[in-house]
Image (cartoon, rainbow, N blue to C red):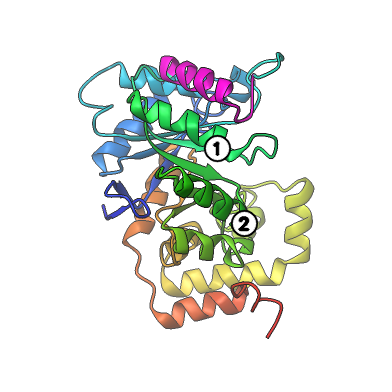
């Protein structure tokens, strides 16, 4: 396994992140335990979850599964860089969501209880809270750091200017501020290249891409649908119909390189500026094993250029839309 520092910190994390969103609603608890054990066997130390994960099993259910896995002992917690998130409403009462100082305090304590741990390595804001001042957010975070309940703070789904706003507010308080940003980023959806990646680089944030296969569209969707192993519905069906030739070209290039399409998509992300590691949320052990293999793929300049031809990206703003 390859490791890198998370942004400008001294924290070493694996270049593959185990996403747990499917644990509970899609993946049974025993299978979830097996995937997490396998992650450690493969050297993956970076796990990501959120307080709202659980869907049909109820909000918080995924954190509880991770917590019961930690409770088995064997150094599981100590070997894990644990990331969770807050923002979404966990109840119907006022202050049960977003980033007020009150909710940060309550949501953090509730996550710690579910996760059966006394601290979170990376506590992430799942979304921007336009109704709470940054001074209030950072005061609550600073208190949690002083209490030893969190080590670092990160963001998710922020625009570049949100990152700048957060970091400048933190600097005024002499606080560390954000050390990571979790954004949707893949060969198909490359909007973060305009502003988010430059902001992350400028402020020393590690970028953690979510949906690296864009809902499976980069995982060999053409071959799978033609073989009858994948059924398309809704927006995915519309996208494939509109971009069939592009996706077919991509899958043909993956075969030419000798890689599975999904593994190639993950490897491409690992070659992008500011990217720490993509998140893969496996439903099965097979999906997880495939994701980790991507860490060992090395792409030369010609291969990277060919992928840019198939899926054109963006320049940094304002050059993306100006001279």
Within-10-Å neighbours for mark 2: few <14, some 14–19, many 20+: few
Q: Position of residue 122 (x, y in %)?
A: 40, 37
- Side of 160 relative to 170 (left or right): right
- Side of 103 relative to 271 (left or right): right
Residue at the spot 39% in from the left edge and 73% down from the top edge: 299
Which tag is nearer the camera, tag 1 or tag 2? 1
- Side of 189 relative to 210 (left or right): right
- Which contiguous range is marked in magenta? 96-114
Instruction: Identify the residue at the far left of this view.
Output: 74
Q: Which mark is residue 16?
A: none
Q: Position of residue 112 (x, y in %)?
A: 41, 19
Give SS at disc 2: helix
Within-10-Å neighbours for mark 1: few <14, some 14–19, many 20+: some
Residue at the disc numbered 1: 135
Q: Is residue 38 above or below residue 220?
A: above
Q: Nearer the viewer, residue 92 or 43?
A: 92
Q: Position of residue 52 (x, y in %)?
A: 58, 26
Q: How many marks?
A: 2
Give SS at disc 1: helix
Residue 126 is one of the magenta-drawn residues? no
Residue 102 is one of the magenta-drawn residues? yes
Q: Nearer the viewer, residue 114 or 284?
A: 114
- Side of 97 relative to 117 (left or right): right
Quadrant of the frame with the C terminus = bottom right
Residue 145, quarter of the rendered image: top left
Residue at the spot 64% in from the left edge and 19% down from the top edge: 96
Residue at the disc numbered 2: 161
Distance (Cα) linking label 1 and label 2: 16 Å
């Amino acid at each position: 396994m390859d490791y890198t520092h998370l942004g400008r910190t001294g924290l070493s994390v694996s270049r593959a992140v185990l996403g747990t969103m499917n644990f509970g609603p899609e993946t049974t608890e025993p299978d979830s335990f097996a995937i997490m054990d396998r992650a450690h066997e493969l050297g993956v130390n970076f796990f990501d979850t959120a307080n709202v994960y659980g869907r049909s099993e109820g909000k918080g259910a995924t954190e509880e599964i991770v917590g019961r896995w930690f409770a088995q002992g064997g150094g599981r917690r100590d070997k894990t860089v644990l990331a969770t998130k807050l923002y979404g409403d966990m109840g119907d009462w006022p202050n049960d969501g977003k980033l007020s100082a009150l909710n940060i305090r309550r949501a953090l304590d509730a996550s710690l209880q579910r996760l059966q741990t006394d601290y979170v390595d990376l506590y992430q804001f799942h979304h921007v809270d336009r109704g709470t001042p940054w001074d209030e957010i950072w005061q609550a975070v600073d208190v949690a750091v002083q209490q030893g309940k969190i080590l670092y703070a990160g963001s998710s789904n922020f625009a570049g200017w949100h990152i700048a706003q957060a970091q400048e507010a933190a600097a005024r308080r002499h606080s560390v501020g954000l050390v990571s940003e979790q954004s949707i980023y893949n060969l198909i959806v490359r909007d973060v290249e305009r502003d988010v990646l430059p902001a992350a680089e400028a402020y020393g944030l590690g970028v953690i891409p979510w949906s690296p296969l864009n809902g499976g569209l980069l995982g060999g969707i053409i071959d799978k649908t033609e073989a009858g192993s994948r059924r398309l519905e809704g927006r995915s069906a519309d996208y494939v119909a509109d971009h069939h030739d592009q996706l077919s070209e991509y899958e043909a290039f993956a075969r030419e390189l000798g890689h599975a399409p999904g593994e190639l998509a993950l490897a491409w992300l690992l070659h992008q500026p500011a990217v720490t590691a993509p998140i893969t949320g496996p439903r099965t052990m097979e999906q997880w094993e495939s994701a980790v293999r991507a860490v060992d793929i090395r792409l030369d300049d010609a291969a990277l250029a060919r992928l840019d031809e198939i899926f054109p990206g963006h320049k940094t703003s304002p050059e993306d839309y100006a001279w």
